[in-house]
Amino acid sequence: MKRPVVFLLAAVVAGIFTACAEKPVSNPVKSDKWLIISPSSVQLDVGDEYVITPTFSSDEAEALDYEWSVSDPSVLAITEDNNSSITVAGLTPGNVTVSVACPGETKRLTGTMSFTVMEKEPEPLRILAIGNSFSQDAVEQYLWNLFNEAGVEVIIGNMYIGGCSLERHWTNVQNNTAGYEYRKVVNGSKTNTKNWSLEMALADENWDYISLQQASDYSGMYDKYEPYLGNLIDWVLENSSNPRMQLMFHQTWAYSKDSGHQAFPNYGKDQMVMYNGIVDAAEKSMTNHPEIKLLIPSGTAIQNGRTSSIGDEWDRDGYHLNTDYGRFAAACTWYETISGNNVLENEWRPSTVTNEEAEIARIAAHNAVLHPYEVTDMSDY
């Protein structure tokens, strides 16, 4: 946040400042000082900026050359120097002094200001999924617990319409359709609110991460992604209130081998054909849209787990993940992708998941983050 500070420069006697300028400077105000600083001290949070803009008694005084300095640049840094004004930024907690001087005029054209840089209160991490039931499986149950175990406060939102495709999301944006159920997890407690629009959701929190994904029917068909993915990316970037927000793409999973889902025949009822299509579409999405900063490879995590002793038993109905280790594996993938922390070092697990199942889920997720576009053999687990 930038806040102006006023420096009042007043002249004591008319004269010529041979040390600072070739031309005379008129100073009609009589005083014992050339420079009065108000306020004399400022408090600033780490990460915040402060603009110091003096007000001079004459154009001649403003035209002089000034030197700015900070007593401890590791605490407060000058990020922009425009000679007669500067911008400073808090770096670390501490107390410093900012000084300004016109060379040669050590008494009359000098001034100081004290800064106290404070540690900013930690903000919660804010994650929003624009998805459907597959994002429900991934983020609504166990993701908060994994972050909580790591000591990170997190707010999680999911804009839910069952089976919602990228095309439908884009149509909803164009019509400002309030047809979503907004599922929000705060302090480990989830609320569901109906009749929300995507515009309302983006305005609800200063989201740090926002994910997009395709409906499972078309997840392995890249020709069904565009132009809707690109349009949604542009809209989210334009409407996000957080300039540091990172876009993510959620790579979903293939159906079970015996799935009765109506879209499975589009992939020849072949799980690997569907998985390879999903991987191809995700890779093209990342390549064609460099605005997407993170890929969440839940699909690869589940496919990794299918090579373990658990086999193909990761879903509850042929396509939605089971509510125990299936959802836990997806949550582990989201956690490691966003936090950058190795999920193998996070000891939390749902009470309904055994230690062995939790280990397989974590390893499947970790390997997926390392190798998002290929299956890691886990037959030893």
Image (cartoon, rainbow, N blue to C red):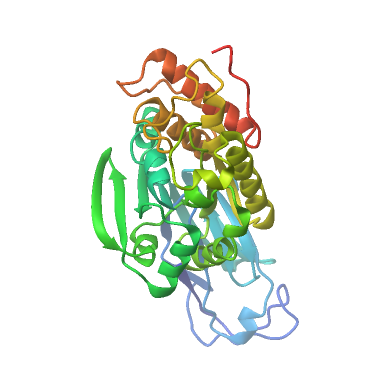
Closest to the observer, 34 or 113: 113
Q: Is 100 left, or right, of 153 in this rendering? A: right
Horizontal and vertical percent position of residue 137: 38, 39
**Considering depth in this image, is 167 or 183 the residue closer to the camera?**
167
Q: Residue furthest right?
A: 22
**Left or right side of 379 for 169:** left
Q: Residue 313, located in which quarter of the rendered image?
A: top left
Which residue does the image show at 24% across and 48% down from the upper left? Answer: 191
Place of residue 41 in the rendered image (x, y in percent of width and height, measured from the top left) = 42, 58
Relative image position of residue 267 (x, y in whole percent): 58, 44
Q: Does 123 appear above or below 330?
A: below
Nearest the viewer among 132 and 60 is 132
Q: Quadrant of the C terminus?
A: top right
Instruction: Name above or below for residue 20 compared with residue 281.
Output: below
Residue 131 visible, this angle? yes
Residue 201, horizontal then vertical, whole percent: 36, 60
Residue 371 vs 289, above or below: the answer is above
Number of numbered markers: 0
Q: Is residue 153 positioned above or below 71 on the image? A: above
Look at the image and tell me whether residue 213 can be seen.
no
Q: Quadrant of the N terminus?
A: bottom left
Residue positioned 64% across, 65% down in the render: 81
